[in-house]
C-alpha cells in the first residue's frame, strides 16, 4: 500500500488484533466444480513465496534495483509455471516515471524526498500474464497486486512481507489455481489478467502506466480485484473497499458484491466496509485499484474491489517480516479472491459500477 510523501517513514499505528480461530469453511456449494483450484491454494505455498519475496536477498524490492528485478523474474517464472496457457502471454512491462501522463505524485515531489535522503528510482517494471477465456474472451477480469516495497532507507531494510509480498504471493497461487483448472479443460468465460505492479509505494506509478498503456483494451476490462496487505490481524476479519465514498459497495457494484458474498459463504469472514475517512489519502486512493477506477470517465467506471487485512504496527517498518504473517488468513483471502474471480469471469452478467 502506498505511502503519503509527507510521511515516507510512515508512523501511522493501528492496533493488531490477536488472531482467533480461522473462518469455518462451509461446503463449496456451487463452487464444488472448481474444488481442485480452490484446494491448490495452500498456506505453505503462500509462505514459501512470501518468505522468498521478503528475504534479505530481495532487499525490500524497491523499484529500479537489482533486488526488485530478481523479484520480478521470480514472479514471471511462477506465472509460466502455472500452466502452458500462461507461457505465451507472460511478459514484462518496463516504464519510466516521466512516461506516465497522469501521475498521482509529481516527479518534483519525489525529487524533494530524494533531497532528504530517501532512495527513489524513477523507473519500474510491471509483470503480467493473460489466461484467455472462452465465450467472452475479449472481456477481461484483472487480478492484481503490487510487488515493490521500500527497499533500504537510511540504512534500514524494509522487507515488506505483508506489504505486499502477501498480495503478490496470493496472485501467484490464484494463477496456479486457474492453471490447474485449465489443464482439466475448465476455462473461464472471460479472460483473466494476472498483474504485478511496480513502484506502487511512491504513488501508484506502475498501475497508472499499465492503464495508460494497457496490454488489453481498457474499455474491455470489466472488473479489477486488488490484493494489498492480506496477511495480518484478526483471522476472521476482512476489509473491503469498492468505492471512494462511504459504505455503499453493495449499491455501487452489485455484481462484484454478489460475487464477494457468494465466495464469503464458503470462507465466512466478517466483512468490514470502513467508513469514509475524508480527503484523497483515505484508503481507497492508496492502492492500485484506484488507477483502474479513475482510468475511465464518470458513468463508465471499471468496477473494482480492494481486499485487505488492514494496517498494523509493522506497516512500512523494518519489522514487517515473514515470520509475523498469519498464513491461514492469507490462504483464506487468496481462496476467497479466487472464488470471486472465477464467478465474475464465468457469469453471464457483466459487472457495472452504478454512479450516484
Image (spheres, rainbow, N blue to C red):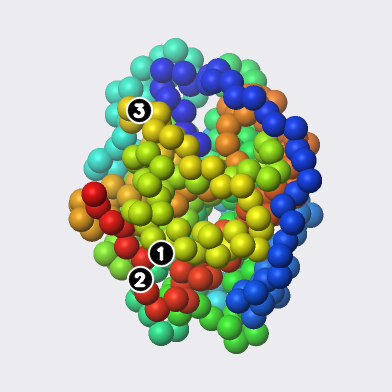
Say which label, 1 or 2, has the lower sequence index.
1
Query: Residue lying furthest top in this view?
Result: 116
Secondary structure type for disc 1: helix
Say which label, 3 or 1, has the lower sequence index.
1
User: Is residue 328 rendered to the left or right of residue 107?
Assistant: right
- Label 1 to label 2, Cα distance in Å? 8 Å
For disc 1, the marked residue is: 255
For disc 3, the marked residue is: 278
User: Is residue 263 rendered to the left or right of residue 23?
Assistant: left
Picture residue at 25% right of the left edge, 40% below the top:
102
Say which label, 2 or 3, has the lower sequence index.
3
Q: Residues within 10 Å of mark 3 (few under 14, many from 20)?
A: few
From this viewpoint, is residue 77 visible?
no
Residue 218 position in % (x across, y down) = 29, 62
Picture residue at 32% right of the left edge, 50% below the top:
293
For disc 2, the marked residue is: 350
Secondary structure type for disc 3: loop
Picture residue at 59% right of the left edge, 50% below the top:
168
Image marks 1 and 2: residues in contact by CB distance under 8 Å: yes
Picture residue at 45% right of the left edge, 58% below the top:
257
Q: Nearer the viewer, mark 1 or mark 2?
A: 1
Residue 21 position in % (x across, y down) = 78, 46
From this viewpoint, is residue 265 visible?
yes
* 261 and 231: which is toward the camera: 261
The correct choice, above or below, for 271 with respect to 336 in the image is above
User: Is residue 229 rendered to the left or right of residue 5?
Assistant: right
Amino acid at each position: 500500500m502506498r505511502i503519503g510523501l509527507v510521511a515516507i517513514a510512515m508512523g501511522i499505528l493501528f492496533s493488531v488484533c490477536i488472531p482467533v480461530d480461522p473462518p469455518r469453511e462451509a461446503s463449496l456449494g456451487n463452487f464444488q466444480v472448481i474444488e481442485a483450484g480452490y484446494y491448490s491454494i495452500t498456506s505453505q505455498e503462500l509462505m514459501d513465496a512470501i518468505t522468498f519475496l521478503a528475504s534479505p536477498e530481495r532487499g525490500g524490492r524497491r523499484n529500479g534495483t537489482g533486488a526488485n528485478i530478481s523479484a520480478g523474474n521470480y514472479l514471471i517464472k511462477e506465472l509460466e509455471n502455472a500452466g502452458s496457457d500462461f507461457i505465451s502471454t507472460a511478459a514484462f512491462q518496463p516504464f519510466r516515471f516521466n512516461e506516465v501522463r497522469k501521475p498521482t505524485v509529481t516527479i518534483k515531489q519525489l525529487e524533494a524526498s530524494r533531497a532528504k535522503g530517501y532512495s527513489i528510482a524513477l523507473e519500474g517494471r510491471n509483470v503480467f500474464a493473460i489466461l484467455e477465456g472462452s465465450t467472452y474472451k475479449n472481456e477481461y477480469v484483472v487480478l492484481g497486486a503490487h510487488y515493490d516495497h521500500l527497499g533500504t532507507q537510511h540504512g534500514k531494510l524494509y522487507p515488506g512481507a505483508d506489504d505486499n509480498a502477501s498480495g503478490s504471493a496470493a496472485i501467484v497461487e490464484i494463477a496456479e489455481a486457474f492453471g490447474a483448472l485449465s489443464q482439466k479443460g475448465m476455462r473461464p468465460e472471460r479472460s483473466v489478467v494476472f498483474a504485478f505492479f511496480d513502484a506502487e509505494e511512491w504513488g501508484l506509478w506502475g498501475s497508472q502506466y499499465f492503464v495508460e498503456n494497457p496490454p488489453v483494451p481498457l474499455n474491455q476490462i470489466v472488473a479489477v480485484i486488488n490484493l494489498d496487505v492480506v496477511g495480518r490481524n484478526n483471522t476472521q476479519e476482512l476489509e473491503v473497499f469498492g468505492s471512494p465514498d462511504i459504505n455503499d459497495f453493495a449499491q455501487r457494484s452489485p455484481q462484484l458484491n454478489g460475487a464477494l458474498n457468494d465466495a464469503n459463504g464458503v470462507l465466512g469472514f466478517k466483512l468490514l466496509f470502513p467508513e469514509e475517512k475524508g480527503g484523497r489519502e483515505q484508503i481507497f486512493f492508496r492502492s492500485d485499484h484506484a488507477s483502474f477506477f479513475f482510468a475511465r470517465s464518470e458513468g463508465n467506471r471499471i468496477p473494482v474491489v480492494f481486499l485487505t487485512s488492514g494496517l498494523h504496527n509493522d506497516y512500512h517498518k523494518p519489522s514487517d517480516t515473514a515470520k509475523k504473517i498469519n498464513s491461514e488468513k492469507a490462504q483464506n483471502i487468496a481462496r476467497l479472491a479466487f472464488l470471486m474471480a472465477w464467478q465474475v469471469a464465468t457469469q453471464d452478467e457483466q459487472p457495472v459500477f452504478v454512479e450516484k
